[in-house]
Image (cartoon, grey):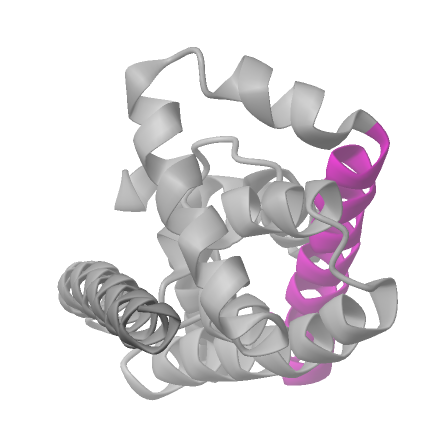
Amino acid sequence: MTETVFGLVTQYGVYVIFASAFLSCLALPIPTSLMMLTGGAFVAAGDLTFWTVSLAAYAGSVLGDQTGYFIGRTGGSTLVDRLARSPARAAVLKRARALVDRRGGMGVFLSTWAVAPLGPWVNFVAGATGLSWRRFTVADVLGETVWVTIYVGLGYVFMDQVSTVAEIMGDIIGLLASLAVVLAMVFWIKGVLRAKAHARHAARHVA
């Protein structure tokens, strides 16, 4: 995989970084993080410039997120229901919805870098559930700034160890995603218990 990505960046430069960032935000299985790490390594080698790599990755990711949001906004719940016909997609959409419902704009912010695997699905859900475009955009712009800075920066610093860094970051992101699911479940359980307590309290007063 790493050799393929190196070959693509060598041949197409920042254009392939832009395209991969854009398409990955629409849930296509493209190794954009590895693309950005590679771009950072090329910057360190003097073959590309930092601002062009960062701008390509940033513009592609923000435009991709915006596209996903407006697809969700246009398709609404019907689109989400269609996507959820696959059990695997249903599970990830449920996690994305929980993140948006619980955290709103903060959930969008976290989905761009801390729990990046949920990012494309959060875009769809945020649009479909009516999260305001302004809140989405502010959170998205800030989050993608963090994502691009981290990966291009790591590629620059660890130019000779891109594959290792990509593997480590994949493990970290996976751990963060799992923790996000656990926290969402904890908040859901607390909400259910609180609602039951209020119901019992109201019942006592009625009696």
Looking at the picture, does residue 91 appear above or below residue 102? above
Q: Is residue 123 left or right of residue 64?
A: left
The answer to whether residue 164 shows anywhere in this view is no
Q: Main secondary structure of the magenta part?
A: helix
Residue 197 drawn at (x, y percent): 24, 73
Q: Nearer the viewer, residue 196 or 207?
A: 207
Q: Is residue 2 left or right of residue 39?
A: left
Which quarter of the image is occupied by the C terminus?
bottom left
| Residue 128, quarter of picture | top right
Residue 149 drawn at (x, y percent): 52, 84
Q: Residue at x 57, y 14 (%)?
A: 82
Residue 89 drawn in magenta: no
Looking at the picture, does residue 189 appear above or below residue 79? below
Q: How many marks?
A: 0
Q: Residue at x 67, y 71 (%)?
A: 140
Q: Nearer the viewer, residue 21 or 155?
A: 21
Q: Is residue 98 left or right of residue 54?
A: left
Q: Nearer the viewer, residue 193 or 159?
A: 193
| Residue 204, quarter of picture | bottom left
Residue 124 drawn at (x, y percent): 64, 41
Query: What residue span does the magenta drawing correspond to?
Result: 47-74
For the view shown, which residue lies furthest in the front direction? 207
Q: Residue at x 23, y 59 (%)?
A: 181
The answer to whether residue 118 shows anywhere in this view is yes
Q: Residue at x 79, y 53 (%)?
A: 66
Which quarter of the image is occupied by the N terminus?
top left
Residue 116 drawn at (x, y percent): 41, 59
